[in-house]
Amino acid sequence: MVYEEEKKVGFVTRKMNYLSEILVNRETANERALVGFAPSLNKRFMKTRE
């Protein structure tokens, strides 16, 4: 049972790290602005955080 919980936490942590990297990374800034998906990513980040 502990392994399953650790597995879930690891998945959420990786997902949050991925989303935050996209949101704050300078290299993806132009793409975020061009496509306009920053608000959507912010929502996904906040939903994952809950």
Image (cartoon, helix red, strand yellow):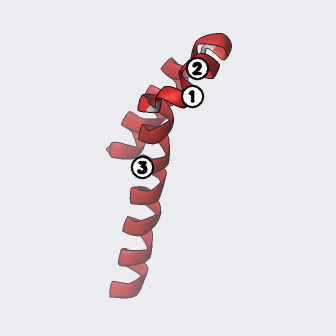
| Residue at mark 3 | 17
- Is there CB contact under 8 Å for labels 2 and 1? yes
Disc 2 crowd, CA 10 A, few/some/many (<14, 14-19, 20+) = some
Q: Quadrant of residue 50?
A: top left
Picture coordinates of residue 4, whole percent (x, y): 42, 81
Question: What is the C-alpha distance between the residues marked 3 and 1?
Answer: 15 Å
| Residue at mark 2 | 32
Disc 3 crowd, CA 10 A, few/some/many (<14, 14-19, 20+) = few
Question: What is the C-alpha distance between the residues marked 2 and 3?
Answer: 17 Å
In this rendering, the label closer to the viewer, 2 or 1: 1
Q: Quadrant of residue 45?
A: top left
Question: What is the C-alpha distance between the residues marked 2 and 1?
Answer: 6 Å
Q: Quadrant of residue 6?
A: bottom left
Q: Work out whether mark 2 precedes mark 3 in sequence or the reverse, and give the earlier one.
A: 3
Q: Judge whether 25 appears above or below 18 on screen.
A: above
Q: Which mark is residue 50?
A: none
Q: Kindly identify the residue that appears in the image at 33 percent across and 86 percent down.
A: 2
Q: Judge whether 42 appears above or below 15 on screen.
A: above
- Is there CB contact under 8 Å for labels 2 and 3? no
Tell me, yes or no, if residue 43 can be seen here: no
Q: Judge whether 7 appears above or below 26 on screen.
A: below
Please, what secondary structure does the residue beneath circle 2 have? helix
| Residue at mark 1 | 28
Picture coordinates of residue 9, whole percent (x, y): 37, 66
